[in-house]
């Protein structure tokens, strides 16, 4: 059985539901039950959660049908049940925060456009992640380490809903891990700001108060992100559910490995790999789709 949840406007849900049921039938997926939204307060104003129960196993077909029938800010398709996960693992840049840290840091070196172009291609999956990371870091050689603190203070902001998402899950007993292809210089203070339990990331080389243009230790790439999820999940016991959020190609293995893998305002390849999608700005949509009542939300 598949369960689909999506945030939908109450006024238009019934008409769009008919179109969705027809599209699912044409894709060989039969709807066995549907609950229309009652304006139960998602982050999109007068919106609620539409829930469908279906016979079938083709998540991709259901997601495609929802995309065709609804202009929804968020959706989730899962097998058998949807519940609060025991583990939450998330990307940082353009997911938990609204910026790409290396691009913003590059602005202090006067080369933001050059580095941002490489970042975009890497996140689209057009470049090898590690090679692209090392290339960008090399271009920052000689930059004062103090620029990082300045960048954090002046440029880096939490994504709307990020604090509430992390704080609420933690209050419900969820283990939270920030895992990033970015740098501990940024990720450690971001994790403290948002309330994550653990941080995994890359380390910038620094000598004499300046960036060396190199990295220290092993690289946190897509394989490591997925490995961290599996490692953490193994400590929680059999049957524990996991949640992952990310936006780029290097998040795909992590998203695919999670019970609920959410692509947040994501690049096309990452969005296609996810069984959950948040296309709005507010990450509390994840809480809405998980069925966490607003009364249980924590502001962080």
Image: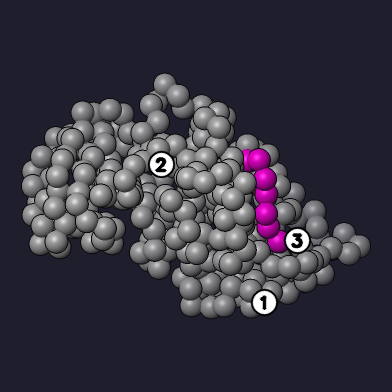
Q: How is the image coloured?
A: one colour
- Tag 3 residue: 203
Disc 3 from disc 2: Cα separation: 30 Å
Discs 1, 3 touching: Cβ within 8 Å = no
Residue that appears at 56% across and 44% down? 237
Q: Which residues are magenta?
A: 196-202
Label 1 vs label 3, nearer the camera: 3
- Tag 1 residue: 135
Magenta-colored segment: predominant secondary structure = strand
Residue that appears at 42% across and 63% down? 270
Q: Earlier in the sequence, mark 1 or mark 2?
A: 1
Horizontal and vertical percent position of residue 125:
48, 73
State the residue in front, 6 or 133.
6
Label 1 vs label 2, nearer the camera: 2
Horizontal and vertical percent position of residue 70:
20, 50
| Image vertical order of residue 32 relative to residue 210, above or below | above
| Image vertical order of residue 283 relative to residue 258, above or below | above
Horizontal and vertical percent position of residue 223:
58, 67
Left or right: residue 119 compared with residue 4: right
Element carrying mark 2: helix
Disc 1 from disc 3: Cα separation: 15 Å
- Residue 235's mark? none
Element carrying mark 3: strand
Magenta span has 200? Answer: yes
State the residue in front, 252 or 156.
252
Can residue 248 be seen? Answer: no
Horizontal and vertical percent position of residue 89:
55, 49
Element carrying mark 1: helix
Q: Quadrant of residue 49?
A: top left
Q: Residue furthest right?
A: 208
Q: Earlier in the sequence, mark 3 or mark 2?
A: 3
Q: Earlier in the sequence, mark 1 or mark 3?
A: 1
């Amino acid at each position: 059985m598949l369960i689909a949840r999506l945030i939908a406007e109450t006024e238009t849900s019934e008409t769009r539901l008919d179109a969705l049921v027809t599209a699912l039938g044409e894709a060989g997926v039969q709807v066995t039950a549907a609950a229309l939204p009652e304006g139960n307060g998602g982050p999109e104003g007068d919106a609620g959660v539409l829930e469908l129960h279906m016979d079938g196993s083709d998540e991709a077909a259901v997601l495609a049908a929802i995309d065709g029938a609804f202009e929804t800010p968020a959706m989730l398709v899962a097998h058998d049940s949807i519940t609060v996960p025991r583990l939450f693992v998330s990307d940082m840049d353009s997911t938990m925060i609204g910026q790409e840290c290396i691009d913003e840091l590059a602005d202090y070196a006067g080369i933001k456009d050059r580095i941002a172009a490489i970042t975009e291609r890497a996140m689209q999956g057009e470049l090898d992640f590690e090679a692209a990371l090392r290339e960008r870091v090399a271009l920052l050689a000689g930059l004062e380490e103090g620029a990082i603190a300045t960048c954090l203070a002046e440029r880096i902001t939490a994504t709307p809903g990020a604090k509430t998402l992390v704080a609420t899950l933690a209050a419900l007993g969820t283990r939270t891990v920030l895992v990033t292809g970015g740098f501990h210089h940024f990720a450690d203070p971001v994790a403290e700001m948002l309330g994550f339990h653990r941080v995994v990331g890359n380390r910038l080389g620094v000598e004499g108060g300046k960036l060396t243009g190199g990295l220290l230790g092993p690289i946190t790439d897509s394989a490591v992100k997925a490995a961290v999820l599996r490692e953490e999940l193994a400590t929680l016991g059999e049957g524990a559910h996991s949640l992952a959020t990310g936006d780029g190609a290097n998040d795909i293995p992590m998203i695919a490995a999670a019970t609920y893998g959410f692509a947040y305002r994501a690049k096309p390849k990452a969005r296609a790999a996810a069984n959950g999608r948040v296309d709005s700005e507010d990450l509390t949509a994840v809480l809405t789709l998980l069925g966490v009542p607003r009364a249980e939300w924590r502001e962080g």
